[in-house]
Amino acid sequence: MAISNFVIKTAESELKEDRNTRNYKTVTFTEAVMMQTPWGLVAKPSTQCVSTKINCYEQNYLGKEDPGYNDPIFDARNPSAGGIFMGAIPQRMVEAYEIVSADGSVREVESYKTVVFGDTASPSWENTVKAAFKSRGHEVVTNDADTVSFGNKIVHIDSKTVDA
């Protein structure tokens, strides 16, 4: 039986307002990945887990509150308080796009990672990932079966490694 991974809310910004006067917070999520050991399933050490930030809206374009907007920051001493969600932070190859650094330099990248909420053990997980990437403006260009991500690297089945 496969077990789903989880993401936990580890930080949030102060309340902000976008140019359309919608309220949002920049929220940091960290993967809580389970790994198989000789003693059974255990949580991967936090230093080996991936984190990322996304903007969570009080009312998104579908008129709903984004997961994480009003949820508490996860507290391991009181996990029942909330701040934990089924999901993962996958990284995929996408259509090339440019990132402008604070110093004005521009670099082109072809990979992207984001928080995806859902059951990672579900047969439809990859469709959920593709939909989440598309909603963030990044079309996945390869199938999950063609690539595997290891930390900040994406390895293709032809063994070519691309920096993330």
Image (tube, rainbow, N blue to C red):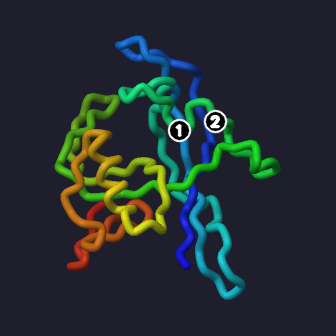
- Which label is found at residue 138? none
- Label 2's element? loop
Q: Do the residues labelled 2 and 1 touch (CB within 8 Å)?
A: yes
Question: Which residue does the image show at 60% across and 80% down from the upper left?
Answer: 36
Q: Name the residue under label 2.
A: 71
Using the image as rendered, state which of residue 101 and residue 133 is in the foreground. Answer: 133
Q: Residue at x 56, y 70 (%)?
A: 3
Pointer 1: what residue? 67
Say what amino acid the circle numbered 1 marks: Pro
Who is closer to the viewer here, 36 or 135? Answer: 135
> Looking at the figure, which quarter contains the N terminus?
bottom right
In the image: residue 28, left or right of residue 43: left
Query: Extreme right residue here?
Result: 77
Cα–Cα gap, marks 2 and 1: 7 Å
Please, what is the three-letter code of the amino acid marked with disc 2?
A: Asp
- Image location (x, y in percent) of residue 47: 61, 60
- How far across and down, in percent of the image, does residue 117 sit? 47, 50
Screen quadrant of the C terminus? bottom left
> Dot 1: what SS?
loop
**Residue 148's spot in the image, x, y percent?**
34, 70
Specify few, some or many for label 2: CA neighbours under 10 Å numbering under 14, 14-19, or 20 or more. Answer: few
- Left or right: residue 91 compared with residue 117: left
